[in-house]
Image (cartoon, rainbow, N blue to C red):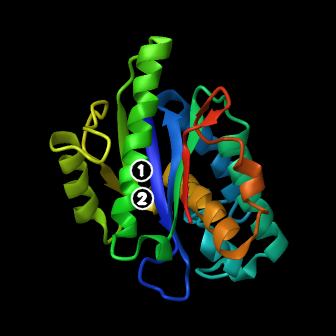
């Protein structure tokens, strides 16, 4: 089974922010444990005695919020880059690949950025699973895992609608279950999804490519065609 961990970055309602991002990392089930171990090593730089006390969360790490200010800025920034490197860039492409939807809110006035982004992610991950089956004989199901948020009920409703009534490109067919919502503090992979979404947000909202450059070649692709990244500007 392939697990797609998703998180969001940017605010739907803040008029000072141009972009909303929904993005994350698809992980083959057996790879998740090893990624967690690598991320724990990075967390242990800050609290060696209890790495699980540290949540790798992009915006607070960069800004020095939620207890991060006591650690040096360069150490915090390097930890974000290293987490993206060991959690994504260094992993085998057949086991780990990225998906992301970047929505410029002004480009879809009158529409819901969350729904628009989730529709893109649902369809693209579904097509990835379909491609594995038809082109590579690898019949895997998938499941989407989200950070717990105020959008939980909306996402669950959308997922059911896409499965039974269809979305803009048809119905989803390769999901084992409706999306599952986890506490990010308990899941390193949700934290990694947050870092992916934050990297995309910083790149588009602030023209900061320092994190994006680590992962820009890791989005789902087949040959020369990149399928995993959707940008609506």
Residue 98, image x and y in percent? Answer: 57, 44
Disc sitting over residue 90 in the figure: none
Count of residue discs: 2
Task: In the displayed orientation, state which residue is furthest to the top.
Answer: 137
Point 76% across, 69% down: residue: 208
In screen coordinates, is 129 left or right of 27? left
Q: Please identify the quarter of the rendering in which residue 13 is found.
A: bottom left
Q: Tell me, yes or no, whether the two marked residues, 1 and 2, touch with CB atoms within 8 Å.
A: yes
Q: Tell me the quarter of the image containing the N terminus.
A: top left
Q: Is residue 101 above or below residue 165?
A: below
The residue beneath circle 1 is 120
Residue in view at x 34 percent, y 70 percent: 112
- Mark 1 lies on a secondary structure that is helix
Relative to 117, is 228 on the left or the right?
right
Whether residue 157 is visible here, answered yes or no, is: yes
Say which residue label 2 marks.
117
Which of 53 and 150 lies nearest the eye of the viewer?
Answer: 150
Q: Residue at x 72, y 65 (%)?
A: 46
User: With respect to residue 210, does 14 lie above or below?
Assistant: below
Residue 229: give x, y in percent of width and height: 57, 48
Q: Which residue is at 48% across, 64% downward?
A: 8
Tell me if I can see residue 138 in this picture.
Answer: no
Assign the C terminus to one quadrant of the image: bottom right
Callout 2 environment at 10 Å: few (<14), some (14 to 19), or many (20+)? Answer: many
The image shows residue 231, relative to residue 17, as above or below, that is: above
- Residue 122 horizontal/vertical position (percent): 37, 45
Marks 1 and 2, how far apart at CA: 5 Å
* Residue placed furthest toward the right: 74
Image position of 98 with respect to 79: above or below: above
| 109, 66: nearer the viewer | 109
């Amino acid at each position: 089974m392939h697990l797609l961990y998703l998180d969001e970055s940017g605010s739907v309602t803040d008029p000072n922010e141009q972009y909303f991002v929904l993005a994350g990392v698809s992980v083959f089930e057996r790879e998740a444990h090893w990624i967690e171990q690598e991320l724990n090593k990075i967390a242990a730089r800050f609290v060696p005695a209890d790495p699980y006390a540290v949540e790798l969360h992009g915006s607070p790490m960069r800004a020095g919020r939620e207890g991060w200010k006591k650690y040096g800025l360069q150490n915090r920034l390097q930890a974000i880059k290293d987490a993206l490197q060991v959690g994504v860039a260094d992993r085998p492409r057949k086991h780990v690949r990225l998906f992301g939807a970047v929505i410029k809110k002004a480009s879809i006035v009158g529409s819901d950025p969350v729904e628009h982004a989730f529709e893109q992610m649902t369809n693209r991950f579904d097509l990835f699973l379909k491609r594995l089956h038809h082109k590579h004989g690898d019949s895997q199901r998938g499941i989407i895992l989200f950070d717990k948020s105020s959008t939980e009920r909306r996402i669950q409703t959308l997922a059911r609608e896409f499965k039974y009534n269809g979305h803009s490109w048809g119905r989803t067919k390769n999901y084992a279950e409706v999306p599952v919502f986890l506490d990010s503090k308990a899941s390193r992979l949700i934290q990694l999804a947050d870092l992916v979404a934050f990297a995309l947000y910083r790149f588009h909202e602030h023209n900061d490519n320092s994190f994006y450059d680590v992962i820009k070649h890791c989005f789902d692709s087949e040959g020369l065609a990149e399928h995993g990244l959707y940008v609506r500007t």
